[in-house]
C-alpha cells in the first residue's frame, strides 16, 4: 500500500474503510504535502465509460460545494487497472468518528441527536441550494468532528453510479443503503432534494432509537416497507421522546415527497421548535430563515446553556465504564500494590510505582490509553523481575495465585477490548497487552512443562478465535453487500 501512488501524486498510506462502492484510504498529496482521503472506486462499478464520465461530472459539481459541514472534494481522476480504469476521488481528510461508529455505543440523547441532525441539515440546505441532492444520507456518510459539528461525506457519488449499480446487480435497487432509501428512489420516480429529507427522517429515527425505521431479512423486505408500511413511532421504542420531535420524524418519513418538509431549512426549524416545545427552555438556537442565501458558515448549533450532552462528552473527559477503563483502573491499583509489596528491591521503585499509579488515576478520565501506559509500566516491570526468579527461590506461595489471577483478569480485559475494537479496525494494541499479561500470568502460576503446554493451547485457541472472527466478519460483509445489491469490491 505504501508505494501505491495515484495520478503520480496521491500516495496511499493506510486503508481507512471499505464501503459498497470502493475503499477509502488515508493518503498524502505529494505536491501540496497534505493529508487527504482517497476513495478508490470499484472497477466493476465504473465499467462503462458513460458512468465514469458521469462520475467526473458529479464530482466536479460536488467540488463546487463550499460549506464547513461538507467534506471538500480536492480532485478526481482514474487509475489504470487490468479490469478497467478505476476512478478515484481525493477529498478532505476528516478526523472524527462516523455516526455509525457513534451508534455502536447506543442511541444518542434527544438534544445530541437533534444537534447532529441540524448540522447535517445545514449541509444539505447548502447543497440543495446548489442543486445537488446527496441521495445516500446514512450514518456512515456523516462524520462527527466535534460535539456540535459534522462533515457530510460522499456528495455526488450515489448519483453517478445509480444506473450502473442497478444494471450490474440486476436487483433493480438504486444505489444507497436500503434502510435509508426513499420510496421514490425505490420505485424509480423522479428524485429531488426531498429524498434527502426522507433519509434524514430515517437517520434521526436511528440516532434516537439505535435502529432505522424499517428493518427486515432482505433488501426486498426493507424496500417493501419503505413503500407501503407505516413507520413504527419512535416513542414506542423509546418512551420519553418529545412528541414534537416524533412528529418531525413522521413528517420527514412521508411516502409522498409532498407530505414532507419543503426544504432542509424548514425541517431544521421544525426540529428546533420541537425541542423548545419539549420544555428545554435554555435552547439558544434558532433555525436560519429558509429563504436565506446559501451560507458559508453553519447556523448556530442547538445547545443548552451550561448543559452537557452525551456527544459533548465524547470530546471531553469521560468516566464511562468500558473494558479499556477497567484495564486502566486495574493497572493503577496494581501499580499501587506493587509499591507496597516491595516487589522490586530498590530504593526508588516504590515511589515510582506510587507516582505511576496516582498519575494513572488522575489521567484516567481524560485518556484510558495514557492511564494504561503509565500504570502498567511498573506492574510489568515488577512481574518481569519477580516471575521466574522469585518463584524458583521462594517456591509456591498463595500470594502468587492472587497475582497470577489478577494478571489473568487483565488478560481477559485486554481480550474483550481487542474484540470490541475489531469492528473498527482497532484492538491490535490490546491484543499485544493481552499476550503480555496472559504469558506473565501463566509464567507466574505454573511450572515449566505445564506453562508451555498452556501457552500452546492458548495460542491455538486465540488464533482459531481470531481466524473465525475474521471469517465471520467477511461472510457478514459479503452478505451485507449481497443484501444491498452492491458489487463486491475486488480490491
Ligand atoms: N474524507 C474522509 N476522511 C476520513 N475518513 C473517511 C473519509 N471518507 C470515508 N472515511 C472513512 O472510510 C469509511 C468507509 O467509507 P465508505 O464511504 O467507503 O463506506 P460507507 O460510507 O460505509 O459506504 P458507501 O460506499 O455506501 O458510502 C468510513 O466509514 C469512514 O470511516
Ligand atoms: Mg461513504
Image: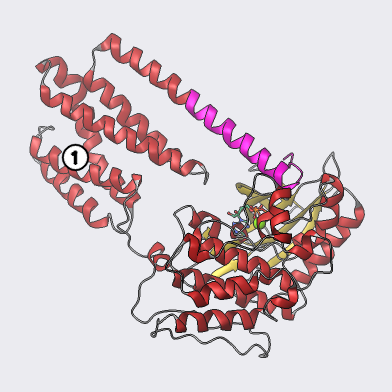
Residue at (14%, 47%) from the top-left corner? 354
Is residue 110 one of those drawn in magenta? no
The residue closer to the viewer here, 437 or 169, is 169
Task: Specify the principal SS of the magenta part.
Answer: helix
Left or right of 136 in this view: 57: right
Q: Is residue 4 visible?
A: no
Q: Which residues are magenta?
A: 464-491
Residue 42 locus on image (x, y percent): 77, 47
- Quarter in which the N terminus is drawn: top right
Image quarter where ligand 1 lies: bottom right
The colour style of the image is secondary structure
Is residue 486 one of those drawn in magenta? yes
Residue at (29%, 43%) from the top-left corner? 327
Q: Element at badge 1?
A: helix
Residue 273 locus on image (x, y percent): 51, 84
Single out the residue that lies furthest toward the top.
Answer: 449
Which image quadrant is residue 346 in?
A: top left
Q: Which residue is mark 1?
A: 334
- Quarter in which the C terminus is drawn: top right
Q: Is residue 62 above or below residue 331?
A: below
Residue 443 locus on image (x, y percent): 26, 20
The residue closer to the viewer here, 153 or 34, is 153
Residue at (29%, 35%) from the top-left corner? 410
Amino acid at each position: 500500500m505504501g508505494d501505491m501512488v495515484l495520478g503520480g501524486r496521491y500516495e496511499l498510506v493506510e486503508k481507512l474503510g471499505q464501503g459498497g462502492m470502493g475503499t477509502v484510504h488515508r493518503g498524502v498529496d505529494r505536491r501540496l504535502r497534505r493529508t487527504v482521503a482517497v476513495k478508490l472506486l470499484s472497477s466493476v462499478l465504473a465499467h462503462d465509460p458513460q458512468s465514469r464520465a458521469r462520475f467526473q461530472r458529479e464530482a466536479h459539481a460536488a467540488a463546487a460545494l463550499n460549506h464547513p459541514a461538507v467534506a471538500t472534494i480536492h480532485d478526481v481522476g482514474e487509475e489504470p487497472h487490468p479490469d478497467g480504469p478505476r476512478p478515484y476521488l481525493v477529498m478532505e481528510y476528516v478526523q472524527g468518528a462516523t455516526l455509525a461508529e457513534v451508534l455502536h455505543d447506543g442511541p444518542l440523547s434527544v438534544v445530541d441527536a437533534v444537534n447532529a441532525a441540524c448540522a447535517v441539515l445545514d449541509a444539505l440546505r447548502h447543497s440543495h441550494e446548489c442543486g445537488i441532492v446527496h441521495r445516500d444520507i446514512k450514518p456512515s456518510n456523516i462524520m462527527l468532528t466535534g460535539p456540535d459539528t459534522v462533515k457530510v461525506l460522499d456528495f455526488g457519488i450515489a448519483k453517478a453510479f445509480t444506473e450502473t449499480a442497478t444494471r450490474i446487480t440486476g436487483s433493480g435497487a438504486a444505489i444507497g443503503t436500503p434502510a435509508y432509501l426513499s420510496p421514490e428512489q425505490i420505485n424509480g420516480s423522479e428524485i429531488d432534494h426531498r429524498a434527502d429529507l426522507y433519509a434524514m427522517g430515517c437517520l434521526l429515527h436511528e440516532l434516537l432509537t439505535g435502529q432505522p425505521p424499517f428493518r427486515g431479512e432482505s433488501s426486498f423486505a426493507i424496500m417493501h416497507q419503505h413503500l407501503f408500511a407505516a413507520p413504527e413511532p419512535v416513542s414506542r421504542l423509546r418512551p420519553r421522546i418529545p412528541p414534537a420531535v416524533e412528529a418531525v420524524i413522521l413528517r420527514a418519513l412521508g411516502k409522498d415527497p409532498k407530505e414532507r418538509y419543503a426544504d432542509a431549512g424548514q425541517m431544521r426549524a421544525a426540529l428546533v421548535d420541537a425541542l423548545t416545545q419539549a420544555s428545554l427552555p435554555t435552547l439558544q438556537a434558532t433555525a436560519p430563515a429558509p429563504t436565506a442565501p446559501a451560507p458559508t458558515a453553519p447556523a448556530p448549533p442547538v445547545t443548552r446553556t451550561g448543559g452537557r450532552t452525551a456527544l459533548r462528552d465524547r470530546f471531553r473527559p469521560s468516566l464511562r465504564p468500558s473494558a479499556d477503563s477497567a484495564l486502566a483502573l486495574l493497572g493503577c491499583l496494581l501499580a499501587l500494590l506493587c509499591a507496597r509489596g516491595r516487589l522490586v528491591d530498590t530504593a526508588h521503585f516504590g515511589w515510582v510505582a506510587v507516582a505511576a499509579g496516582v498519575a494513572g488515576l488522575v489521567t484516567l478520565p481524560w485518556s484510558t490509553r495514557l492511564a494504561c501506559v503509565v500504570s502498567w509500566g511498573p506492574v510489568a516491570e515488577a512481574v518481569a523481575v519477580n516471575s521466574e526468579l522469585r518463584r524458583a527461590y521462594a517456591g509456591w506461595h498463595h500470594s502468587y495465585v492472587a497475582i497470577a489471577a489478577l494478571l489473568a483478569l487483565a488478560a481477559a480485559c485486554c481480550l474483550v477490548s481487542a474484540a470490541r475494537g475489531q469492528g473498527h479496525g482497532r484492538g491490535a494494541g490490546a491484543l499485544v497487552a493481552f499476550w503480555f499479561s496472559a504469558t506473565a500470568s501463566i509464567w507466574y502460576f505454573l511450572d515449566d512443562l505445564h506453562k508451555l503446554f498452556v501457552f500452546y493451547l492458548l495460542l491455538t485457541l486465540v488464533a482459531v478465535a481470531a481466524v473465525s472472527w475474521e471469517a465471520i466478519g467477511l461472510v457478514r460483509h459479503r452478505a451485507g453487500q449481497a443484501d444491498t445489491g452492491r458489487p463486491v469490491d475486488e480490491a
